[in-house]
């Protein structure tokens, strides 16, 4: 039988990177399963927040990007005609939608699939959008959108991809979807770099902290800055990412201004996706008290280069302290984050959590598990039955 044709809709893809985790999820899936399934990616012609198209691409046409066919949709009304044309003309067995609340891509994808009578061939990955933290923002609008989509009958046969059992619970709770239509498979991460490439921890100097993410309220940078006000040791924090709202940027700037002189904060701007690992490898600790992640690729990337992590209890990364990879603290207890930071600053370089090679070696057991790859493989194989050409 021919390869299963998977038509992927994702708002942002290479050469972009500001769109966060979905880009990583899809690119890793293509890299690890591309020899078994025929992935074609449909995406926007520009990165999140940008007003100009990517340079070096053909807009409104298929491009070869990292061994995968990628179609960049132009802006304007032609965006929708091109998108619908791809759904109606492409020989796909699975329409893989990434994001539930994307009106431009997901809603039109669901409508087109319904018109074609192919709702059972739609795989929708909410990517953590139904978590408690994510649903706490713009709640009324999201509830109205959910009600509208359900009233149109667009989810009657849709299959859902959850990264974890917890996310499956969220999908079931928020949408009222039957559990039998939810597939669970952890997001895929590329294997860690060679141990010989791991940077050794600094011998002395202030504790070097890093925060790298989209600078949105959900990622909780303001929590980081508030907690640093109580840290007793000398420390520096480098923040990588682009603010999505001026009001949040101003709020964080005010928090930085209140910090003691022993805490230095630098805003370092955007990092290209391919450079994330090299950036994270320069720091002692990745501090990420996010309000919610269905996976958290940046967490895996930190551990892959031997950088331990300090996380909130709103991610699937549990048991980190037992595994010697970092700490997980409840957001309701900010003093626990401060205790970790004060204690970490006194750990000698080259020992415990500051032995980067040891952290990386421990991380190998949790990253890119063959079981995760197989689970993702089975998600797509579940569509194989009855797949014949365009049917």
Image (cartoon, rainbow, N blue to C red):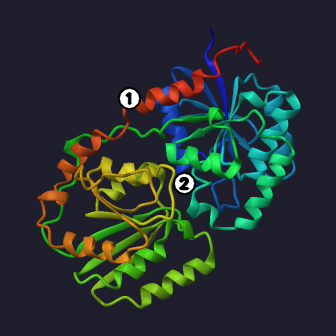
In which quadrant of the rendered image does the N terminus lie?
A: top right
Based on the displayed image, in which of its 4 quarters is residue 89 positioned? top right
Nearest the eye: 183 or 42: 183
What residue is pinned by disc 2?
20
Q: Residues within 10 Å of mark 1 (few under 14, many from 20)?
A: few
What residue is pinned by disc 1?
370
Q: Give residue 106's position: percent from left, percent from top.
A: 74, 45
- Between disc 2 and disc 1, the foreground one is 1
Q: CA distance from mark 2 to mark 1?
A: 24 Å
Query: In the visual, does 27 lie left or right of 319?
Result: right
Q: Relative to residue 16, is residue 333 depicted above or below?
A: below
Any part of residue 302 in sight: yes
Query: In the visual, does 205 lie left or right of 26?
Result: left
Q: Residue furthest top?
A: 1
Q: Give residue 47's position: percent from left, percent from top.
A: 63, 55
Q: Secondary structure at mark 1?
A: helix
Based on the displayed image, in which of its 4 quarters is residue 61 positioned? top right
| Total tally of numbered discs in the picture | 2
Q: Residue at x 72, y 27 (%)?
A: 121
Any part of residue 14 in sight: no
Nearest the eye: 57 or 213: 213
Q: Relative to residue 99, is residue 265 depicted above or below?
A: below
Q: Give residue 254's position: percent from left, percent from top.
A: 49, 88
Q: Give residue 149's position: percent from left, percent from top.
A: 81, 48
Q: Residue at x 70, y 66 (%)?
A: 139
């Amino acid at each position: 039988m021919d390869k299963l044709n998977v038509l992927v809709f994702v708002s942002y893809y290479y050469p972009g990177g500001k769109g966060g985790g979905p880009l990583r999820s899809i690119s890793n899936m293509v890299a690890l399963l591309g020899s078994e399934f025929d992935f074609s990616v449909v995406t926007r012609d520009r990165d999140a927040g940008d007003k100009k198209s990517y340079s070096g691409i053909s807009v409104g046409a298929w491009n070869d990007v990292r061994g995968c066919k990628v179609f960049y949709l132009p802006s304007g009304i032609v965006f929708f005609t091109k998108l619908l044309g791809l759904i109606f003309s492409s020989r796909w067995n699975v329409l893989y939608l990434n994001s539930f609340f994307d009106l431009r891509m997901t809603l039109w994808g669901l409508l087109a699939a319904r018109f074609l009578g192919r709702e059972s061939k739609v795989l929708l990955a909410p990517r953590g959008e139904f978590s408690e933290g994510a649903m706490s923002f713009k709640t009324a609008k999201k509830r109205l959108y959910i009600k509208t989509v359900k009233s149109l009958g667009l989810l009657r046969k849709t299959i859902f991809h959850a990264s974890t059992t917890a996310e499956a619970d969220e999908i079931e709770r928020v949408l009222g979807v039957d559990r039998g239509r939810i597939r669970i498979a952890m997001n895929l991460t590329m294997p860690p770099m060679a141990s010989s490439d791991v940077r050794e921890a600094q011998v002395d100097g202030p504790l070097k902290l890093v925060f790298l993410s989209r600078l949105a309220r959900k990622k909780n940078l303001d929590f980081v800055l508030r907690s640093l006000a109580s840290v007793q040791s000398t420390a520096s924090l480098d923040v990588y990412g682009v603010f999505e709202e001026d009001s949040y940027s101003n709020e964080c700037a005010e928090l930085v201004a209140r910090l003691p002189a022993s805490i230095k904060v630098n805003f370092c701007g955007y990092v290209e996706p391919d450079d994330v690992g090299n950036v994270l490898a320069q720091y002692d600790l990745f501090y990420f008290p996010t309000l919610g992640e269905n996976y958290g690729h940046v967490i895996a990337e930190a551990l892959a280069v031997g950088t331990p992590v300090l996380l909130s209890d709103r991610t699937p990364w549990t048991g980190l302290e037992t595994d010697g990879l970092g700490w997980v603290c409840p957001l309701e207890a900010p003093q626990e984050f401060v205790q970790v930071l004060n204690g970490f600053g006194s750990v000698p370089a080259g020992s415990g959590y500051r032995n980067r090679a040891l952290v990386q070696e421990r991380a190998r057991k949790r990253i890119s598990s063959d079981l995760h790859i197989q689970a993702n493989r089975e998600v797509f194989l579940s569509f194989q039955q009855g797949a014949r050409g365009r049917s």
